Image: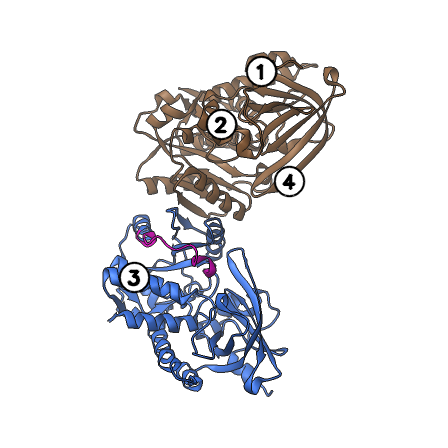
Chain colours: A blue, B brown
Amino acid sequence: MRKLDAQAIEDIALGAALLGTGGGGDPYIGKLMALQAIKDHGPVTVISKDEVPDDALVLPTAMMGAPTVLIEKIANGCEFKKVFEAMEKHMGKKIYATMPIEAGGVNSMIPLAVAAQMGVPIIDGDGMGRAFPELQMVTYHLHGVTSSPMAITDEKGNMSILNTINNKWSENLARALTVEQGGSVMIGIYPMEGRQIKACAIDGVMTFSQEIGKAIRESSSHETPPVEQLLEKINGYELFRGKISDVRRETKEGFNFGTVKIDGIESYKGETCQVEFQNENLIAKRGDRVVATTPDLICMVDLENIIPITTDALKYGSRVLVIGLKCDDQWRTDKGIETVGPRYFGYDMDYIPIEERLKEVW
Amino acid sequence: MRKLDAQAIEDIALGAALLGTGGGGDPYIGKLMALQAIKDHGPVTVISKDEVPDDALVLPTAMMGAPTVLIEKIANGCEFKKVFEAMEKHMGKKIYATMPIEAGGVNSMIPLAVAAQMGVPIIDGDGMGRAFPELQMVTYHLHGVTSSPMAITDEKGNMSILNTINNKWSENLARALTVEQGGSVMIGIYPMEGRQIKACAIDGVMTFSQEIGKAIRESSSHETPPVEQLLEKINGYELFRGKISDVRRETKEGFNFGTVKIDGIESYKGETCQVEFQNENLIAKRGDRVVATTPDLICMVDLENIIPITTDALKYGSRVLVIGLKCDDQWRTDKGIETVGPRYFGYDMDYIPIEERLKEVW
């Protein structure tokens, strides 16, 4: 158990934005929400998943929708008070703690704001170890945990409780509501008992995010940020360095879809790299060759200050470093690959672990 | 209080299909559901709205979506058991009775099937006195009754409870779910106490439907059905007689949209009539002249047997009689016109009561 102060939150926001692999929303917006909540309600208590009583009810909380929308459609601040009330009434049980469903600029911060506001601890764990675009893409799903009942609310005050027959139906129905409600909503989903959290949550995402964020913060003031030091810290692979030459982007069906093209610089001069995304970066190609695919993490940072860049902030001319990271082992199982592998997203290719892809001779 | 037998149900289905003004679904499907429920569970008790205790909870029940879809996507029979359970749990109160929200081939029958299955009475009243395509188009809405909480379920078992900030939001969110869930769902909506029903429900729709149905049944066996007798019985206006020469139809956003053109016969020879619909018939024109608009009722019956024709059963070559009926006075108030008048449906014209329109010299 430990307490988080404002500096910790700044670092977590920064580090989680890297793990967000381009998605997970603008860390600036998320951070403001969390810092404000801590200012209003005091510091947040973080506990490890092992500290949760087996029968305690935990409700993961998040924003759902296209992160670009959230910038213009700010929360009213009462959403999660209503989500807690609705879920506690519906389930007939008090909520003991909250936690993130994913790592990302917004969705790492929202549970912190919720924990501060509702006076409950936050668990140092999540369901992805990164960000993914759909609700069934969590390790909870791999273990057969149901996303129902799920609460969805918006800044206007509409509140729905969904009980679906499976997690893909939760995704479909919640997505339809998200689009109808203006493109972003606040949700409470995958209510779980402590024993379930222990069995299937990915451990330590908040601590890891904080370490990454601290490393970025300490490096980014250097005239030439020590990229190698960061890569070593996060056990990452350098995939490409270059200047963004083209960004194509489309917001449809509640998602941000797009492609970014990068012209190589330094040792990559003369080469190009292309990254395709659906909220999160999914596929990275160097020339014609695939160098990393989902569920491994494909992250981009600004070469000037090694600060992570979300897909909605990509812009022509930026000099970026593309980084690859191994995903959690749970994603490398058959059910994991089926749920979040390249074929799920419509790419006709097998998943090959990033370390295997990079072993091949160039 | 009275009991309904199979013949009564046949008559109600027939009569309600006329009041459905082209919408409200196929009376054959609806009737089968109600007859089966009565066969399985015994006859249904009908009570008048004055017989409901002031504090008793009443839950109107219905199908939502494009009626054409229901033909290929039959209910599994357990939908309303689940709706009752979910709403009773959510509201913490036992449901005393059900009732229709509208008159129509399917939505007059579904509450009968629900009443039989759940062993509760059905109230002889509704919220439209006809059919309309959207959820806020009920007299309950005119009196400020909220549609929330609302339950939505499908034949697969997905169950949502919506609590919205107003009735138009219920329509929007429920419509988005309806489309996502395959185009038709079963709903429980506008839960009301007895005192609210007494204040705002339209009285006697079931009795009136049954009388119309009986009149049609008794007339339809005649070689030349006595149309005048039916018109007198229902206080209706003959608007046109002709042969359908064109039907345009489109299912989009969960609705059936379309236009039907009719070439005049007998005393209408040389003239044409056009009726436009969104699930229900909205506007009838004789030549260039508007002869009836929503909220007044525009109904079509087959000239061979005076059986009502729903918009999804309109076909080239049918000989039809177009009938107009005055709507309930509640629809003729300012809020009524705003809610269901021609402008709401995108027509740039004022509402003029049908009896005024028909007074004008031809």
The answer to whether one can see residue B190 in this image is yes
- Report, in whole angstroms, how far the alpha carbon at label 4 lies from the one at label 1: 33 Å
Nearer the N terminus, badge 2 or badge 1?
Answer: 1
Give above or below for B317 relative to A7.
above
Discs 3 and 1 share one subunit = no
- Report, in whole angstroms, how far the alpha carbon at label 3 lies from the one at label 2: 47 Å
Q: Residues within 10 Å of mark 2 (few under 14, many from 20)?
A: some
Give above or below for B152 relative to B114.
below
Discs 3 and 2 share one subunit = no
Q: Quadrant of residue A223?
A: bottom left
Q: Is residue A80 magenta?
A: yes
Q: Residues within 10 Å of mark 1 (few under 14, many from 20)?
A: many
Outermost residue to the right: B270
Discs 3 and 4 share one subunit = no
Discs 4 and 1 share one subunit = yes
Q: Say which mark, if any, is on residue A36.
A: 3
The answer to whether one can see residue B38 in this image is no
- Report, in whole angstroms, how far the alpha carbon at label 3 lies from the one at label 1: 69 Å
Residue type beneath disc 1: Ala
To which residue does mark 4 refer?
B250
Could you tell me residue B182's position as x and y percent? 55, 46
To which residue does mark 1 refer?
B215
Relative placement, left or right, of B98 versus A262 is left
Q: Quadrant of the N terminus of chain A?
A: bottom left
